[in-house]
Image (cartoon, rainbow, N blue to C red):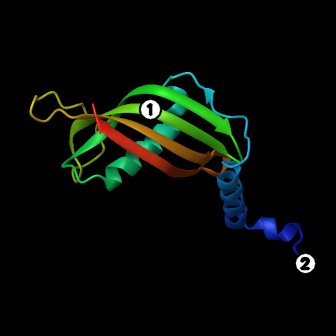
């Protein structure tokens, strides 16, 4: 029988949470609430976003979050963040070593920034993140 035992599998539980969150978009959640734009309390979400961005990018250089412009969150089966950030090209090359800080490019020819809007679904207590939407326009 489908007893409590089936929820002992964290992946099954996670799949159920994600499905519920996706379906929830057609129902009425509380809606998105404005959140303070301090980088600190958004750290792990921003880190996840920029890592995902850099992995998908074919730029020679890594980008980093330059400025958190807007942040909204809503509680569903996890936490959803709708975020607007400014990201900028750094001096660190993608395939270089990543153990030092990456200052933002200041050479005119190499300077590049984007304003990105993205939606992240996260189950923080399971350390789970998923990028649902992202669009970036050159700043």
Query: Front-most of 64 and 57?
Result: 57
Write the residue at 81% across / 70% down: 6
- Locate residue 61, reporting x and y percent: 21, 45
Relative placement, left or right, of 77 versus 110 is right
In the rendered view, tell whether residue 72 sits above or below residue 93. Answer: above
First-in-chain label (1 vs 2): 2
- Locate residue 50, reporting x and y percent: 39, 43
**SS for callout 2:** loop
Label 1, residues with CA under 10 Å away: few <14, some 14-19, many ≥20? many
Query: Front-most of 137 and 122?
Result: 137
Write the residue at 52% across / 43% down: 119
**SS for callout 1:** strand
Which of the 4 quarters of the picture holds residue 30?
top right
- Mark 1 and mark 2: span between their CA atoms? 46 Å
Relative placement, left or right, of 135 versus 18 is left
| Label 2 sits on residue | 1
- Locate residue 65, reporting x and y percent: 36, 34
Query: Front-most of 37 and 9?
Result: 37
- Residue 85: tell me if it is visible: yes
Label 2, residues with CA under 10 Å away: few <14, some 14-19, many ≥20? few
Write the residue at 10% across / 28% down: 108
Which residue in the rendered view is the most extreme toward the front?
Answer: 26
| Label 1 sits on residue | 84
Which quadrant does the C terminus fall into?
top left
- Residue 101: tell me if it is visible: no
- Locate residue 21, reporting x and y percent: 68, 51
Which quadrant does the N terminus fall into?
bottom right
Write the residue at 87% across / 73% down: 2
Relative placement, left or right, of 41 versus 113 is right
């Amino acid at each position: 029988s489908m007893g409590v035992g089936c929820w002992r599998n964290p992946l099954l539980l996670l799949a159920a949470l994600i499905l519920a969150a996706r379906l929830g978009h057609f129902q009425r959640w509380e809606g998105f609430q404005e959140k303070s734009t301090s980088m600190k309390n958004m750290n792990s979400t921003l880190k996840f976003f920029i890592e995902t961005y850099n992995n998908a990018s074919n730029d020679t250089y890594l980008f980093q979050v330059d400025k958190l412009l807007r942040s909204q969150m809503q509680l569903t089966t996890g936490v959803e963040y709708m975020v607007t950030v400014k990201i900028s090209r750094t001096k660190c090359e993608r395939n270089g070593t990543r153990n030092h800080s990456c200052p933002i490019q200041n050479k005119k020819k190499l300077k590049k920034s984007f304003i990105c809007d993205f939606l992240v679904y996260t189950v923080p207590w399971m350390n789970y993140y998923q990028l649902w939407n992202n669009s970036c326009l050159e700043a």
